[in-house]
Image (cartoon, helix red, strand yellow):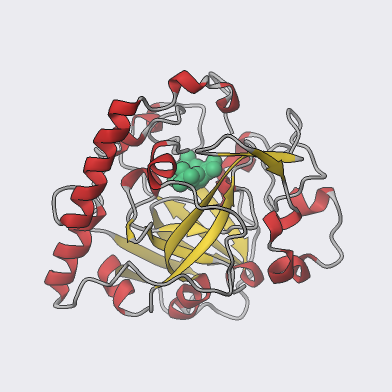
Amino acid sequence: MPIIRRQGWEIPESRVTPEAAVLGRRTLLAGLAAGPVLGAGSLLGAGAARAGIAAPAMNLPPDPAYPAGRALTTEHAAATYNNYYEFSQDKDLWRAAQKMTIAPWSIRIEGMVAKPRTIGFEDLLAQVKLEERIYRHRCVEAWAMTVPWTGFPMAELVKLADPLPSAKYVVFTTIEQPKSMPGLDSPIFPWPYVEGVTMAEATNPLAFISVGMFGKPLAKQSGAPIRITLPWKYGFKSGKAFVKVAFTDRQPNTFWAQIAPNEYGFWANVNPAVPHPRWSQATERLIGTDDRVPTQIFNGYGPFVASLYAGMKGDMLYR
Ligand code: MTE
C-alpha cells in the first residue's frame, strides 16, 4: 500500500515492535478480556448493559467449514503488525490506535434501501448470531496471517439493511476521527477510507463482518468495534471501523483505487499470477515466523468464490 514515504515491505525488522512493547500489549489485551478499562471490551460491557442485553460470547468453537490450512498467527504478532493509515504508515501503530474512541458507535445504512436508518452497534449485535471462523488474511504487500475472527456473515447485514432489488454494490465507509487519527491530516489521501463489493460478493457465505479476534472483542488497531473480513481478497478491501453501509447501482471509487488504480484495483482478488506493478505476488511472508509460502489463487478460497468471477480472466480478477 505504501506509496509515499517508505515502502511498507521495506520496513526493517528492527522497526517491528520491541519486546517490551509487545509485553505491554499483552497486558492491554488481558485488560480488554478482563473488563472495562480500554477498548472494545468496555464498549461491549457498557453497551450491553445500556441495552439490557448480555454481552455476546466471543470465545466460540471455530466453524469447521473453513479450515485454517496453516498454523494460527500468534495473537501478539497479529495485534502488533497492522495497516491503519488513519493512524500511521508504520506497522507498529497499535500504540497510536489506543487513542481512538469506539463507544458509542452507530452505523448509518443508506442509499438504495427500503428504509435508511442508523443502527447502534449493540442493537446490531443483538440481531445477529456470532460465530468464529479461522481465515487466512493476505495483504497486497505480500504478508499474511491466519486469524480466528468472531463475527457474522456479511449476508446477515445485507438482509437487515433490506436493499432495493436495483442495488448492485455495497459500499463501506470507515470512521474519520480527527482527534485520534493523525493520518487524516495528510492531504495526499482521499479520506474517508471507502471500500465496496458487489451484492453477489457481499452475500457470498465467505464474506464476514468481524467484531472479535482470538476470542476477544477486536483491538482498536485491528478495526474495533467492527470491520470487514474478505479472506479471498487483498486486505485493503477489508475496511476497519466502518460507520456507513450504502447500497448503490454504481461501482464505487474506492480509497486505494483513487490513489493508484493500476496498483489497487476494485476487484483485488488474491492472484499469484498477477504481480503488483512493483513486486511479485507469487509468494507471501507469514507474520510471526517469516516463513515464505506460495500464494494461492483467491487465497485458497476458490471453491467458495471462483464462481463469482466466471468469465473474468487473469488481470481482470485483480483490477
Ligand atoms: N481500514 C482502514 N480504515 N484503514 C486502513 O488503512 N488498511 C487495510 C485494511 N483496512 C486499512 C483498513 C489494509 S491495507 C490491510 S492489509 C488490512 O486492513 C490490515 O488489517 P490488519 O492490520 O488487521 O492485519
As drawn, 216 above or below 295: below
As drawn, 62 above or below 175: below
Q: Is residue 44 left or right of residue 215?
A: left
Task: Name the spot of residue 314 as percent of width and height, x first.
Answer: 85, 51
Closest to the observer, 193 or 232: 232
Q: Residue 109 lies in what quarter of the image? A: bottom left
Q: Is residue 306 left or right of residue 76?
A: right
As drawn, 67 above or below 317: below
Residue 192 seen in this snapshot? no
Q: Check the picture and name the quadrant holding the N terminus.
A: top right
Q: Residue at x 34, y 80 (%)?
A: 127
Task: Name the spot of residue 100 as percent of width and height, x first.
Answer: 27, 42
Task: Name the spot of residue 215 as percent of width and height, x first.
Answer: 34, 61
Residue 69 seen in this snapshot? yes
Closest to the observer, 70 or 177: 70
Q: Residue at x 77, y 71 (%)?
A: 307
Task: Name the spot of residue 270 as percent of width and height, x first.
Answer: 70, 50
Number of numbered discs on residues: 0
Q: Residue at x 45, y 38 (%)?
A: 82
